[in-house]
Amino acid sequence: MQNVVKIGVAGLGTVGAGTVKLLSEHRDNLADRSGSPMIVTAVSARDRTRDRGFSTEGITWYEDARDLATDKNVDVVVETIGGSDGIAYDVCKAALENGKHVVTANKALIALHGVELARIADAHNVTIAYEAAVAGGIPVIKALREGLAGNAISRVTGILNGTCNYILTTMREQGRDFADVLAEAQKLGYAEADPTFDVDGIDAAHKLAILTSLAFGVEVDFDAIAVEGIRSVSALDIQLAEELGYRIKLLAIAKQTPEGIEQRVSPVLVDRSTQISKVEGVFNAVVLEGDYVGPVVLQGRGAGERPTASAVVADLVDIAAGRNAPVFGVPADRLKKNVRASLEKHVGPYYLRLMVWDRPGVMAEVTATLAKHGVSMASMIQHGRAETEGGVVPVVFVTHETSEAAMSGALSDISAFESNSQPPVLMRIEGFTS
Amino acid sequence: MQNVVKIGVAGLGTVGAGTVKLLSEHRDNLADRSGSPMIVTAVSARDRTRDRGFSTEGITWYEDARDLATDKNVDVVVETIGGSDGIAYDVCKAALENGKHVVTANKALIALHGVELARIADAHNVTIAYEAAVAGGIPVIKALREGLAGNAISRVTGILNGTCNYILTTMREQGRDFADVLAEAQKLGYAEADPTFDVDGIDAAHKLAILTSLAFGVEVDFDAIAVEGIRSVSALDIQLAEELGYRIKLLAIAKQTPEGIEQRVSPVLVDRSTQISKVEGVFNAVVLEGDYVGPVVLQGRGAGERPTASAVVADLVDIAAGRNAPVFGVPADRLKKNVRASLEKHVGPYYLRLMVWDRPGVMAEVTATLAKHGVSMASMIQHGRAETEGGVVPVVFVTHETSEAAMSGALSDISAFESNSQPPVLMRIEGFTS
């Protein structure tokens, strides 16, 4: 059954062009693996004259990507335009409605419109695949949807944004501050000119929303995620965390709790003996915890032309081979509504760092307040006055397991103390068994 | 299409019983994920009276597992008997010939008879799936076969035997010798009464043979693997390696070389900054390196009732959902013959440790011999006489990239020196980019 699979590529930026190149470079091997030769029959991009490293001879060129959705000579549309709405959304929706499969690298689209698109896909007996949308070339979507299908997942944790991980790694290794390292990352091309989506945690949250749906069989619920980026992480906190045996990572976390699913993106402290703490630079990693399999860690390059093309083509091979899985692991009409767990009910250890005027009574005041809120301490660091200027010293508390509500209450009281030279910093500590 | 998928389980040991339990415990979710309810209709095991933690009421019981292959009320046979030949082989072959899918955790069977079974499977339009055969619950078969299908793989490296990794980890952490730690591991149930398959590297080699076929599209070629276990690894070498910034791991490695595929299992030194060096205890890990994706690391529990059942059930879900992939990624008749790369042509750095009588001229003799064979040195450790008894001292050389042939020549000459108080130890150093 050597049916040729005809592919239309919407957008010829990094990912689109990389995909076309990969399909051409590994054509014979891909045909062996999928059972069907795959050829690019149509493309769409703004600038027709740009050299993208491959010939477009014999390929239909559309000004408007939406035309790919109705081209009878296209079986699968690869969408690499990006953005949660606009053309990307239009192309994907129309392609599915016209009975074409869709492969996309668009996390915002799936995070915000995934369930709607899955319903349309199910109704037309096609699929929308998005391995490339999360963690680049790491086959984490496939691992969750198929590889760990036998498990009840208790928690999904990820380093899902390479830009943030690169910045945090560099801040730690070189003792430099956020703004400084961000500027350098922008110069090196590791961060966008407008870094908001990355450094404010939104990109990681888009990806987390998708993983949560797959892991727990619930509808994607992006708005449920408590999102905090890395702008407020200081070189000082990174260094103090190290002293205590921790590393600061921007983690995206979805956890099954008795109340519902807790979803959050924020800088957290992780023990330096854990695998995820050792994932450095632009690498991504995901920890999947299942009731049968235990913890599984997947690590690799989370972005870039070639890793992302690898993921797009894996989806294309599945489609060409007729290996269709439901978009979120189960049919869209079997997805449960997400039940949100309030973050106030979160229980775990915390890192609290104050910067205080070093005078008698300060410690007594703080510890008494923590005790009043039922927060018990596991460890503390106070450095001597000599290390800082003007009599201001950092004081760090690591707590035992505490509820977020109790911790917020204590923080609110402590923030009001006149002894603070700057607002206190509070971060969660996330535990791992491996 | 709620067709019930009827499963026959051959063997009710750890893996078989775990599979039956998982299928029952997650029945509803599995039906959602696969689109078809899966039920166990028949089992086979020696002792019918043993309590295995589940009821066999309404399930056909066979004394002879081979009868499962002809039971019309069985669609898929799960083989968990083990062993490369005998009943396991008979059941799997007969089941495929009778048009039944097979799921197995049997690495020896696939490593030795995989191609023959894949041909039979292809001819009868069924599959034999074996996710559980390699690295337990880690979905590495799926990652190689599907997730990285778009890549030309350059190297596959794995910590594939949890027993060996546990022993090496414990030896290092506690400074103890092999025999001592093995005895303890046997007591704790981490090692078998007859540990040969594990500690001599055979189990890891079985798994490597399978990964090699999947990664490079070649016929399984177990006999091509140079296999060396961990019996000769000493606490001293572990400690000296640490001093030099390395950790000793039993790695299974398959590498594409210009000459062909190099396959080997042996203790090697890996830089302590790499991810794989940090995989400790009973955990398994695999590093897959593709031309598009770069390095991908997968880590998790490589054995045990529950992780292995997780993998078996993932295969069952794929089969129930109609997601069939060719047994080794491409149809059996498209697998290439394996071209073996001679290990003599291996090029890389080496660790050479001597134990010599500390007298004038020894170092000059050794370094001159290395130079004579064209081996250039990267670093060296010689400890003072005070540290050892009787004037015997360890001397360690780390070489730059050298061919195995040159190194063997040098080793042969050096071994003849009268200054040796025991035979020299030579190990390869394996490099990783992450």
Image (cartoon, coloured by chain):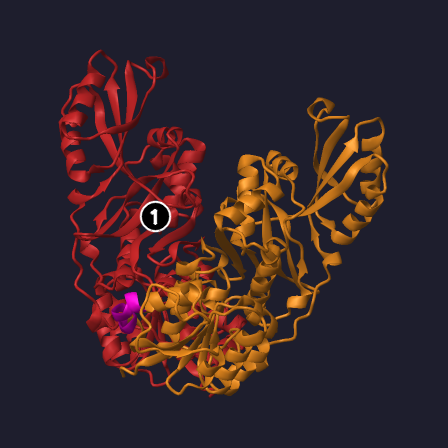
Chain colours: A orange, B red
Residue at 19 percent of width and 39 percent of height: B404
Residue at 32 percent of width and 14 percent of height: B385
Badge 1: chain ID? B
Q: Quadrant of residue A315?
A: bottom left
Q: Position of residue A405 (x, y in %)?
A: 78, 53
Mark 1 = which residue?
B193
Q: Quadrant of residue B214?
A: bottom left
Nearer-the-camera pick, A204 or A383: A204
Looking at the rendered structure, the kind of residue marked 1 is Ala
Q: Is residue A86 above or below residue B53?
A: below
Q: In the image, is residue A130 part of the stretch drawn in magenta?
A: no
Whether residue B17 is visible: no
Q: Residue furthest front?
A: A49
Q: Is residue B415 left or right of residue B76?
A: left
Whether residue A51 is visible: yes
Q: Position of residue A242 (x, y in %)?
A: 59, 36
Q: Is residue B320 left or right of residue B412?
A: right
Residue at 79 percent of width and 28 percent of height: A358
Q: Position of residue B301 (x, y in %)?
A: 44, 54
- For the record, the magenta segment spans A24-32
Q: Is residue B274 above or below residue A9?
A: above
Q: Is residue B253 left or right of residue A109?
A: left
Nearer-the-camera pick, A216 or B232: A216
What is the crowding at mark 1: few (fewer than 14 residues within 10 Å), some, or many (at least 20)? few
Nearer-the-camera pick, A132 or A224: A132
Q: Quadrant of residue B185?
A: top left
How many numbered discs sit on the rendered protein? 1
Q: Position of residue A84 (x, y in %)?
A: 58, 71
Nearer-the-camera pick, A385 or A188: A188
Q: Is residue A393 above or below residue A411?
A: above
Q: What secondary structure is the magenta-colored segment mainly?
A: helix
